[in-house]
Image (tube, grey):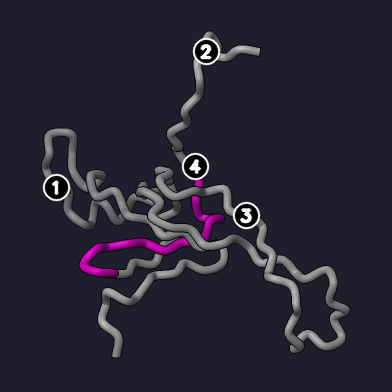
Amino acid sequence: MQSPQHKKLIVIGDRVLIEPDDKEQRTQVGLYLPQSVTEKEQVQGGWVADVGPGIPLADPGSDGDEPWQNSQNAPKYLPMQVENGDYALFLKKSAVEIQWEQKRYLILPQSAILVIMRDTFTLPQDDLEI
């Protein structure tokens, strides 16, 4: 049996691995809210820790008569909109909670994400020379 140091968590398909933002369970003055209060919320936030490759696409070169035969082409995917490091608001009921290396994560399909917040870096227009 391999030790945990040699294992890697791989997100597949259109799934997203989220590190939940637990700060939402506190009030503005720092009091923890009971679980019955936080369970009523339908939307939750968290940081995107990892994303899958995307939605698999059918191989346009296959004739479909013998789908069990291996294709020589590498699989193609419809890329994900979500990226590592994004902050996402998502539907809480679509998430599945897991524990990995003593940390709590949520796995959910990209379709459950309502909106993302991403840091964008733009150069000031004055610095551009044409």
The residue depicted at 48 percent of the width and 58 percent of the height is 51
The residue depicted at 47 percent of the width and 31 percent of the height is 120
Would you place residue 86 above or below residue 123 in this image?
A: below
For disc 1, the marked residue is 32
Pinpoint residue 24: horizontal percent, then vertical percent: 26, 44
The answer to whether residue 4 is magenta is: no
Residue type, label 2: Asp
69 relative position to 64: left or right: left
Q: Nearer the viewer, mark 4 or mark 3?
A: 3
Pinpoint residue 69: horizontal percent, then vertical percent: 76, 88
The residue depicted at 44 percent of the width and 37 percent of the height is 117
Residue type, label 3: Pro
Ranked by sequence position, the earlier of labels 4 and 1 is 1
Give the quarter of the figure containing the C terminus: top right
Q: Foreground residue, 22 or 57?
A: 57
Q: Residue furthest top?
A: 126
Ranked by sequence position, the earlier of labels 4 and 3 is 3
Q: Residues within 10 Å of mark 4 (few under 14, many from 20)?
A: few
Instruction: Work out how far the residue at label 4 is from the one at label 2, CA to CA, in angstroms.
Output: 31 Å
Which label number is shown at residue 127? 2
Instruction: Work out how far the residue at label 1 is from the one at label 3, CA to CA, in angstroms.
Output: 38 Å
Q: Which residues are magenta?
A: 100-114
Ranked by sequence position, the earlier of labels 4 and 2 is 4
Residue type, label 1: Tyr
For disc 3, the marked residue is 79
**Quarter assignment of residue 118:** top left
- Are the residues flagged by discs 1 and 3 in contact, CB closer than 8 Å? no
65 relative position to 101: left or right: right
Which label number is shown at residue 115? 4
Instruction: Work out how far the residue at label 3 is from the one at label 2, CA to CA, in angstroms.
Output: 32 Å
- Are the residues flagged by discs 1 and 2 in contact, CB closer than 8 Å? no
